[in-house]
Image (cartoon, helix red, strand yellow):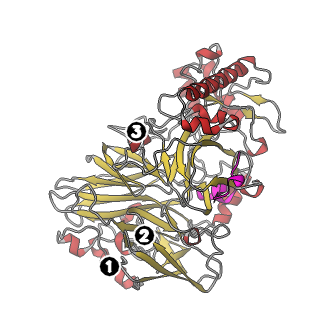
Amino acid sequence: MNIPMHPRRRLLQHAGALTTFALAEQLAPLYAWADTERAAGTPSSGGRADEAGPGTIDLEIDRLSFEVGGRTGSAIALNGSVPGPLLRLREGQEAVIRVNNRLDETSSIHWHGLILPPNMDGVPGVSFAGIAPRSTFTYRFPVRQSGTYWAHSHSGGQELLGLYFPLIIDPAEPDPFLYDRDYVVMLSDWSFESPEAIVSKLKKRSGYYNFQRRTIADFFRDARRNGYSATVKERWSWSKMRMDPTDFADVTGYTYTYLMNGLPPEANWSGLFKRGERVRLRFIDAGAATFFDIRIPGLSMTVVQAHGQNVEPVEVNEFRIGPGETFDVIVRPEDRAYTVFAEALDRSGFTRGTLTPRAGMVAPVPQRRPRPLRTMADMGMDMSGAEGKDAMGGMDMGTARKNAGNGPAMDLAGHDMQGMDEAEKIRAHLNERREATYDAAKKAEDPGAMKMGVAGRKALMGPALPGSPPVMHGPDTHGPGADTVAMASRSRLDDPGSGFEQAEGRVLTYADLRSVQPFPDQRVPEREIELHITGNMDRYMWSFDGRKYSEAKEPIRLRHGERVRLILVNDTMMEHPIHLHGMWMVLENGQGVKQPPLHTVSVKPAERISVAITADAPGSWAMHCHLLLHMELGMFRVVEVSARADEVNS
């Protein structure tokens, strides 16, 4: 089946139903425009003219001029639009997708979240060679799942330049929830600067795009509230760390225009509905660097799907979505217009759309919230719990930062932590607790514990669950690739994150997610791998365990069929969405057999998250941060699934 190209005149025919079409000349996909059939009130499960069904799907990658706000830039588009067209498949079919690369450079398509053969995954240098310039590659794979997904280039900065698109897979059996109307809401960020120019500026000054730093007026306000001495000490502490508490995003609204279905906020994407209808909104974060906070003032949302997987319904007023993630919600609007508001985590910008019963209606755009500040929890200073502040004689052990030249580790207040006996006592206590856990498991004849042996003893801290005490960082500070370590990391699954201090109503957290169906593999993990998320903001370097991908000596090796616990520890002061290709990560969030499978896990600063992985996909797979520049600059690993036991990491 050919997916049609959409010339400008066809898009303009669809523009009449928009409240604003000052930017109608840009080549947005058909699902960005109000549909006259839907305006007449025809219920739909989401079918659109640019969807695909059985047969071969033809896609074409090429460059085009892209206009936003009266400015023109160069984009990389799929079938003539940014984002690309909506593809619709069906669970159980074989997908045959022929991609013609008309660029003068190698390209690729990665099917984000899909379980498929490694040579169809679309990661050049890992699972295939890429789609050569002026050539065609055919993807062919069985469709073994359903839900809301998306796809994007995995070649250089092409994703940032517009090569991404939504993918819906209809289930073989009906979903366990009802809806009358269905819309994709694809969020992204667009810059007229090239990826190379952005990286160059960040390399010279990591805070180049942060124009929300605290001012002298903030100092005097804080001094009146907290006292002059405390305010000076707090500012001096941040100065020693060479960081700013307003650093929430590397790239901000200073250069980004935030888009909804390819349209900027002034173009106001609109979705029509009839009175009494249940509307399904499929939110996809295709941003290269942006976490979005989603709310629809005056309307609650029922979350029914996370990462393409059905979850037990959760009614919320807001939720945060990270790059790579998808969340489906059901809303029941009344006979009036509502603003769909997506605000960047750092509050440097937003995009918006409108749900409306009649074309031309608009709703007020909510007031933007003040930019957030990093908290003690973000800095690894939340020491409450059995191994917390009381155990340390009342001292707050802040995020340790190494001085230039790999000098002595420093706490937040600048105290030399070398030889700090209290910290060693805490580590010794935690080690004793690990040993006690191991001994208890042996006595209970826990098969998982018995298999682990001496090399696996340290893995028996178990999953990082809400309410667990903090875990002290070990002696490895990860070298020059890390300028901070979280002295105390802990589960923050029930914490919505910084920026929701003024939220009205319930905010979704990972702790709320409960799968409708138990994951097929319920075995206790046989061993544990702890991976630290690291970075050096002074040098704008990103890595795992302090080593960039180019410095990693070996892939992460798994044995085919084994069950492994992966613990992600965020030693940076930024949120990171970590994406694993080819296999599900079952989030250990305390929901028992209904813990949800995810393909991307957003890890907060100083957070400790554990996921269980069934290594059921032999081959080489990518794992990386889905902040595009972080991945490109080193936060990337290859996970090798092998059937040979002697190739597995000890």
**Residue 468 inside the magenta-drawn segment:** no
Q: Magenta segment range?
A: 627-650
Where is residue 380? Give x, y as percent.
61, 31
Which quadrant of the rendered structure holds the C terminus?
Answer: top right
Marks 2 and 1 sit apart, C-alpha to C-alpha, by 21 Å
Q: Which residue is mark 2?
A: 143
Q: Nearer the viewer, mark 1 or mark 3?
A: 3
Q: Which residue is tagged 3?
A: 591
Of residue 131 and residue 265, the one placed in the foreground of this image is: 131
> Residue, x 55% and y 37% (percent of image)?
447
Question: In the displayed structure, would residue 373 be above or below residue 26?
Answer: above
The residue type indicated by label 1 comes to Ala
Report the Cα–Cα distance between label 1 and label 3: 40 Å
The reply to whether residue 382 is visible in this rendering is no
Question: To which residue does mark 1 refer?
Answer: 49
Residue drawn at the location 38% of the way across and 67% of the way down? 168
Using the rendered view, name the quadrant where residue 428 is placed.
top right
| Badge 1: residue crowd in 10 Å (few <14, some 14–19, many ≥20) | few
What is the crowding at mark 2: few (fewer than 14 residues within 10 Å), some, or many (at least 20)?
A: some
Contact? badges 2 and 1 (CB < 8 Å): no
Q: Residue, x 83% and y 33% (percent of image)?
A: 407
Residue 37 falls left or right of residue 601: left
Q: Earlier in the sequence, mark 2 or mark 3?
A: 2
Q: Secondary structure at mark 1?
A: loop
The residue mark sitting in front, 2 or 1, is 2
How many numbered circles does the render carry? 3
